[in-house]
Amino acid sequence: MRFSLIMATLNRTREISRFLEKLQSQTYQNLELIVVDQNPDNRLVEILQPYRTSLSIIQVRSEAGASRARNVGLRQASGDIIAFPDDDCWYPQDVLERLKIAFEEHPNWHGFTGSSAGDTYWNRSAGMVNSFNVWKRGIEYSIFLRREVVNQIGFLDENLGPGSGTSCWAGEGTDYLLRALKAGYKIYYDPTLEVHHPGPIIPNQNNSSSLNKTFHYAMGKGRVLRKSDTPVWFVAYQCAKPLGNSILGLIQQRPEKQQIAWSVLQGIIQGWRGVN
């Protein structure tokens, strides 16, 4: 069983060195790393070179956009299992070996998702992924799919995700999982399959940069909710928590909490409405 790890990268060096170091120490080594380089220069050459003798590394280039880069990587992938590690994440030493065993023990399951280490946002209970719990049971860098799923589903939506050129800066991984579920594939979530990634999924600061990021990430969520024909009651459910947190922030006189929650709420609504 061979893993194809597709990493889109832009403006990062130290983080890639960390990923490579951790990848080199994996207890299971039947893998290829496809680095999709979006940098305007050759900064990755000296970073990748020391690992080329111990790891199978393919370096290609693409236009801007995380989804575009991953789609370029998909065209290069030859493995049985496809994954999309971020360029600032890293794997625990045994994660690929555990996944290999899990795929072999469950031949009728078509994919696995894991959680982000140390982030309380994710479900703590294991189970099958469905169209309602998918929002807390998988993100791009914790998705591992059999090749047959990728062959059937095709490419990621390039209008979603960082660098897409749209207002939707997130949601491409969830959209991909929802498309796989709609096609009848079975995907299992195991919260103990942790991938390390800096920072929480939802920013917890109310400076202008964090609020802007929060809004555009939430727009991606809203767009995916609409794209996947999610029932209106579930859209309302997704809006209820940020609305409640916004009101609570006002009552508690905590403007940072109120502003973040309001950004999430507005982003979901505008993304669902299709506002750019």
Image (cartoon, rainbow, N blue to C red):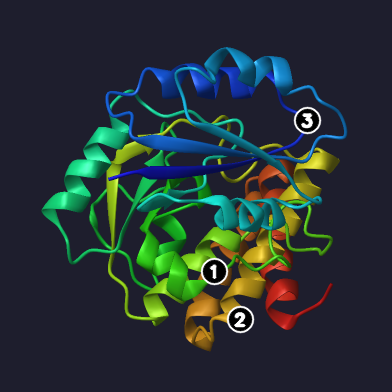
User: Looking at the rendering, in which quadrant would you find the C terminus?
Assistant: bottom right
Question: For mark 3, what is the residue?
Answer: 11
- In the depicted structure, whether residue 49 falls above or below residue 258: above
- View extreme (front): residue: 53
Out of 29 and 263, give the one closest to the viewer.
Answer: 29
Question: For mark 1, what is the residue?
Answer: 175
Disc 2 and disc 3 in contact, CB within 8 angstroms? no
Question: For mark 2, what is the residue?
Answer: 227
Marks 1 and 2, the one that precedes in the sequence: 1
Residue 260: percent from left, percent from top: 70, 50
Residue 215: percent from left, percent from top: 74, 57
Name the secondary structure under disc 3.
loop
- In the depicted structure, whether residue 190 falls above or below residue 239: above
In front: label 2 or label 3: 3
Out of 8 and 169, give the one closest to the viewer.
Answer: 8
Disc 1 and disc 2 in contact, CB within 8 angstroms? yes
- In the depicted structure, whether residue 23 falls above or below residue 107: above
Task: Choose top left, top right, bottom left or bottom right for residue 130.
Answer: bottom left
User: Looking at the rendering, in which quadrant would you find the N terminus?
Assistant: top left
In front: label 1 or label 3: 3
Out of 78 and 254, give the one closest to the viewer.
Answer: 78
Name the secondary structure under disc 2.
helix
